[in-house]
Amino acid sequence: MQVSSLRRPALLTESTGLGRVDHNNYFNFQFVGRDFDGDSIDYILSSGSLPTGLTLDAQSGFISGTIPSFAATETTFTFGVQVRKRDNTEFISPETSFTITIIGEVDSTVTWPDSAMTIKTGEQSQLDVVADISDGRPVQYELKSGSTQVQAGNFVVGETYTIVTAGTTDFISIGSANNTVGTIFTATDVGSGSGTASLGANKLPQGLRLNEDGLIVGRVSFETLVFDTNSTTFDITNLYTNQTTFEQVYSFVARVYSSDGIVDTYKKFTITVVADTTKPYESLFIKALAEQDQRDIYETLIQNNDDIPQEDVYRASDYAFGIQRDIRSLISTGLSPKDESDYIEAMSKNFWNNTLRFGSFKTARALNDDDTVKYEVVYIELIDNKQGTDPVTGLSASPALRQDVRSNVSTWSNPLNVDSGLPDVSHGHYLASQNNDYFVYPNSIENMRSRLKTDIGYQVLERKVLPDWMQDKQVDEVELLYLQPILVRKLEFLIYEE
């Protein structure tokens, strides 16, 4: 048996990321190998592929070339490199893996919104990750699937990461407090070595989801995080004044891409949930039970794309905004979160089918913090014929919550006998010994609101949680759709013309 004294060569360059490189650019990097027997060695690409325009020189170990123009994409290439004896190719080093990310025409094509967002508990989301695409190309959005790990050498300065594998990377030198797996840090340099870090898990606040058009829709949950019935402690002296953040700040990576592959990039976002109220609140709506022919008229109105172009609709894919498919109206919001049985009991008085009439078309607007118009609403005024007129002021007034219909309180009598045909005293709502029923409870909308206020009560001040466009008092109105600013006048004209 012959035993060779030859040894395998070694690739001294350790596994790392070679950086984030712009397209239309010259790039070079040299791998360093060594043969301990003094023999000549070759460098070979053992797996994966290099970016277009780059080649590996077998003798020098240089990877070099001009990277051509890339579309608005961020493409990461992973490849393996080995060294072997030139004249004894069976003597070869283990494979070492490397990555390089090519940045295409992203900055000039895709302009993302600000990455930091805030929303209150219980709030209906108006957040989005919609990017501006310079050429107007149709795109879609999704939470980035697969691994969001990035190898050292490819970190983005200013981005926040979580250490996944420490490897040979000195994370302390690039902004981390330590080199421990799980530590969150903000990169101050691109890094080097074999360590990896993640952009984080794709986690939206409970109740929210990302639509394909980039809108974040839904209502944020009131739920808070509790560990094992509060037996777990934290290294914070007072959780009321020094709150933890893991249950308040959510991070996710949104991907934008086009079907033709010209656009394909991503960005990390954070949503901070502000605990505006410690308890949930409820909202109560009324819904129209329209006849089919009436429903057809409404559908014809809201589905007329000539009068209501989709591009003019505010948050068109959001069920809480856009075009309202159901004819409904908000009765009250901010109500205390009580059992269904409590609501049923409260609604046993003053709640009954009510015939409302359509009034005229009206508009309202919601404003941004700087008083610019966020969106405008076209709605139909509802007329409640159960409302009366105050004889003193001449203004609209609701009837009393309870009215005594006896003709004479002191002399009126209408005994309820056991053998009476109607009502049937065997019914669960009547007793043979009960008094006469002579109170009625008028079902005006205002009376419904008053009954809820009396029997249910409010968890939060109602005007704090009304939709933005209803912050100013606008009672008994049904919203049809939400529009971009300036377009409301055009729609009003078109509707009236029809």
Image (tube, rainbow, N blue to C red):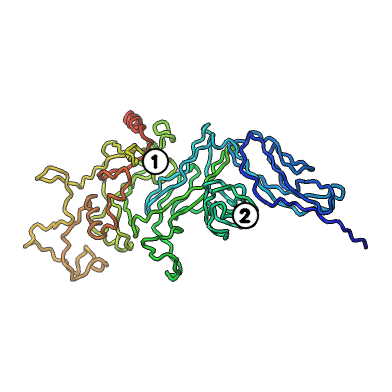
SS for callout 2: loop
Q: Which residue is mark 1?
A: 323
Examine the image and state in which quarter residue 244 appears. Answer: bottom left
Whether residue 19 sits left or right of residue 255 in the image: it is right
Q: Alpha-carbon distance for marks 2 and 1? A: 53 Å
> Looking at the picture, does residue 192 appear above or below residue 102?
below
Quadrant in which the N terminus is drawn: bottom right
> Looking at the picture, does residue 416 appear above or below residue 393?
below
Q: Position of residue 61 (x, y in %)?
A: 75, 44
Q: Nearer the viewer, residue 441 or 478?
A: 478
User: Tag count in the figure?
Assistant: 2
What kind of residue is marked 2?
Thr
Disc nearer the start of the sequence (2/1): 2
Residue found 33% across the figure and 63% down from its top: 339
Q: Position of residue 147 (x, y in %)?
A: 59, 52
Whether residue 257 sits left or right of residue 280 in the image: it is right
Is residue 12 among what the camera can see?
A: yes
Q: Position of residue 121 (x, y in %)?
A: 38, 54
**Disc 2 to disc 1: CB gap under 8 Å:** no
SS for callout 1: loop
What kind of residue is marked 1?
Ile
Quadrant in which the C terminus is drawn: top left
Label annotation for residue 169? 2
